[in-house]
Image: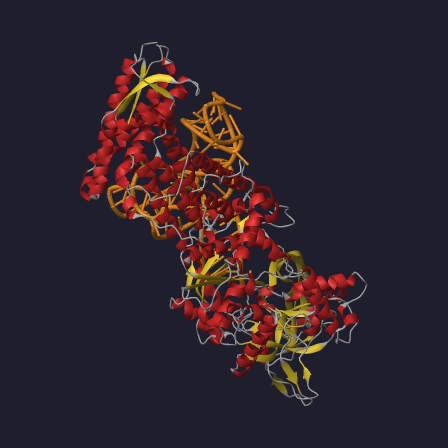
Amino acid sequence: MSSSRELASTFSPQEIEAPLYQKWIKAGYFTADAASSKEAFSIVLPPPNVTGVLHIGHALDQTLQDCLSRMKRMQGFEVLWLPGMDHAGIATQNVVEKQISATGKSRHDLGREEFVKKVWQWKEESGGAILEQMKRLGSSVDWSRERFTMDEGMSKAVVTIFKRMYEAGLIYRAERIINWCPRCLTALSDIEVEHSDDAGELVSIRYGEGDNAIIVATTRAETMLGDTAVAVNPDDERYSHMIGKTVKVPLINREIPIIADQHVDPAFGTGAVKVTPAHDVNDFEIGVRHSLPNIVILDADAKVVNTNSAFDGLDRFDARKAVVEALRAEGRIVAEKRPYMHAVGHCSRCDTTVEPRLSKQWFVKVEPMAKASADAVRSGAVKIEPEALAPRYFEWVDNMHDWCISRQLWWGHRIPVWYGPNGEVQVVGPDETAPAGWTQDSDVLDTWFSSGQWAFSTFGWPEKSADLAKFYPTSVLVTGYDILFFWVVRMMMMSTFAMDGVPPFKTIMLHGLVRDQFGKKMSKSRGNVIDPIEFMDKYGADALRFTLARGANPGTDQALAEDWIGGSRNFATKLWNATRFAMMNGATVAGDLPTVDSLNAIDKWILSRLSETVSEVTDLLERYEYARACELMYHFAWDDLCDWYLELSKESFASGAADASKRVLGHVLDQLFRLMHPVMPFITEQMWTTLTGGESLVVAQWPVANAAHIDKKSEALVGQLQEIITEVRRFRNDQGIKTSLKIPGRIIATGEIAQYSSAVAFVVRMELGEITPSAKCEAAGVTIEFDLTGSIDVVAERARLEKDLVTASKDKQTAEVKLNNQGFMAKAPDNVVVEIRERLEKTTADIERITAALAALPQP
RNA sequence: GGGUGGUUAGCUCAGUGGUAGAGCGUCUCGUUUACACCGAGAAUGUCGGGGGUUCGAAACCCUCACCGCCCA
């Protein structure tokens, strides 16, 4: 191998990352081949919003997906990781509307066609910034297959599936109470509504007069204008005499019935509630049960209408005050509680208080598809990782409400339904045209309706494409548990419907959220948001990726702090320097690895540890245990390799006779870089190509653990060397002996350990030779004597030994207690008993040794 | 209100029956020919409280307290 290759003297991620990503793209490593004979491994990237920028959650999500993709690619799979973006209906429309409003206009001034054109224009110019940012992170996605939920193919798929679902009776139109955002002027699905406890008011109002009076409590006084009943619980004896009678609604004097309904909670307020079927979900259901009329008293802007009262034209919140004032003037306010904390729905996009509104919308009948989705998981066809999160999935799919899919927006897939002059309704498929003179439904579909098809329409569905045949179903979906309900369930439903019951992924791997260093949620208002780009600039993409992967325990949130990213950068630097040092000392991958028998114990030990690490890390990554996998790699690289192997080998490298070790070290680095490449792709690529001269780790083979390298005997031996070295270091430290000072001494060892005396002496800075000992320490059955020319710190040494004595005595005592316990002796398994016996023997010997050493110390 | 997760070192978290761990932080010492983005050594825990099961419990069961998340 050429000796001219070398690593730069300092590790600078900024210099290597971008060129390496370009190299990979140019080589086409990430482009999947549907005609390949290799087994497929596929992932679809959860499409970020076209309006989005890369936040730390994306960085985590993509790091985990990239790890899997890169590992599988190295393992010989035909890997497809498909990227793309979501058109994000409301979010995108809001962005462009804001732009337009800056010029003093509204989208209505432009008209629908012109507006949609503007949105496309915005998308081309400013949309998708996030895709460029993904490249910084190193995501090995197949850019040749990038998709957009509004592109031609996906639009065709949307219309196709709408028609099929309609014909299967799974899509219907109905007048229902839906969540309405009076600012966005559109319907929202349940999941687009966020509930929070707000400070409102609870007002008790007397309806009717004298014996016929009944008091109701409400948080929304203005809706009384639309009341069509008062309801009580049928078992509530306080009101049984009033059921069936009528009462007049104050202010508007409408005569309404008093009805009995099981739904009413006798413990809430007075036990009597006003019923406004057109403006409350529960009231609507009561209305259906009792055939009550629905009186709509709020328009799309949430202003009062149709009441023929002074309140017409008032905004809902102004109307609430005005209604309460008017009632107070009439002496009908019985009680008021302010503030009254209660749950209020808000639009997830603009935070406006959502208004339940009776309107005609399109719905998906979810029950059959939700059942199929639940069954797919219950039967084991789809696995949820970690399993502990499966109950959350079931809770949702088992209790799902029909899904409102129409949105009163302009940006999105227009509902493919046309209406005839006489109220005819027809769904127009992708290759069909509507009859002349008919008009199309003006609404668009919920964004999740199209993104729910992401797992199959991105592969070309409804065409029978080669991609679909090769890569569907996908291998695993990696996403945060926070969108389990939003997106994952919808993908499950739409896919099982469209793909003849074949679910979209074999495994759903859920990760948690990234939080700040104190475990608090990141938010702009808290000012604790971590920008991944900023930290990649500062510490490199590998450091960010390693930190995120190292924190990714299955299904749980992780805290993140700048210091920890810095720590990962330090780790990268450590690897870089170790590799430089190894190469300076001749580490190489040229030629065959020497036979194990010919190696020294230190080489045998590192090979053994390497094989163990490779097999454990591989296993952990296959089980999505990123945190534990990273922990093992970290400690193998830093502790085993850098702190012990390199230190123990320095002496033999310096002595010049280390050809076998050079080859072993080259092998260990080669394999370690392969193993770490999925998590830290850039630095490993740079170091590996420099060391081996190979083309790229992206297309290199995944490391294989070698069972023949596992060597417990060498592990035990090196363990003893470590004990000895640590003991001498403690001694030196306690004695205050300067690191730079080489002390004369000798190591009295027998057997194989004796062969490593010079390696040990090198590490602990001892000069071996014949001496007159004035101090000694003992470990692992070996005595190390020093010539300190008589001047040792007796007090410090006594303290050290006494401390050891206390530890040994305690350990001995616990062992004795166990062995004297008859229950333990009778019931504990043999191996445990043997272990405790050995502990007793060792501690007994230690106590003897330390006591002797103490006695030998000069008296103060 | 329903569901669900948690409480382990100063902080953030691993640890599903056999002598309590990691990273960061802290203290002491140190530029020894890879690395101060470093090295060596050290300190720090009645594993939330109380009961129970077991020879043995951070882990299993019961109970209480306190945090969090999802849904209503």
The quarter of the displayed image where residue A602 is located = top left
Q: Is residue B47 left or right of residue A46?
A: left
Q: Is residue A762 left or right of residue A147?
A: left
Figure check: A105 above or below A647? below
Q: Residue furthest right?
A: A104
Q: Is residue A406 left or right of residue A817?
A: right
Figure check: B52 above or below A188? above
- From the top left corner, tell me how far across and down residue A826 is, in percent: 18, 42
Q: How is the image coloured?
A: secondary structure
Please indicate, yes or no, whether residue A649 appears anywhere in the rendered image: yes
- From the top left corner, tell me how far across and down residue A830 is, in percent: 19, 42
Q: Is residue A653 left or right of residue A251?
A: left
Figure check: A750 above or below A179? above
Residue at the spot 71% in from the left edge and 65% down from the top edge: A121
Residue at the spot 50% in from the left edge and 45% down from the top edge: A686
Q: Residue furthest bottom?
A: A422
The quarter of the displayed image where residue A791 is located = top left
Question: Quick one: A431 or A768, which is closer to the camera?
Answer: A768
Please indicate, yes or no, whether residue A278 appears anywhere in the rendered image: no
- From the top left corner, tell me how far across and down residue A217 is, in percent: 64, 65
- From the top left corner, tell me how far across and down residue A655 is, in percent: 36, 27
Which part of the image, by quadrant, shows the N terminus of chain A?
A: top left
Report the number of discs. Answer: 0
Which part of the image, by quadrant, shows the C terminus of chain A?
A: top left
Residue at the spot 53% in from the left edge and 54% down from the top edge: A24
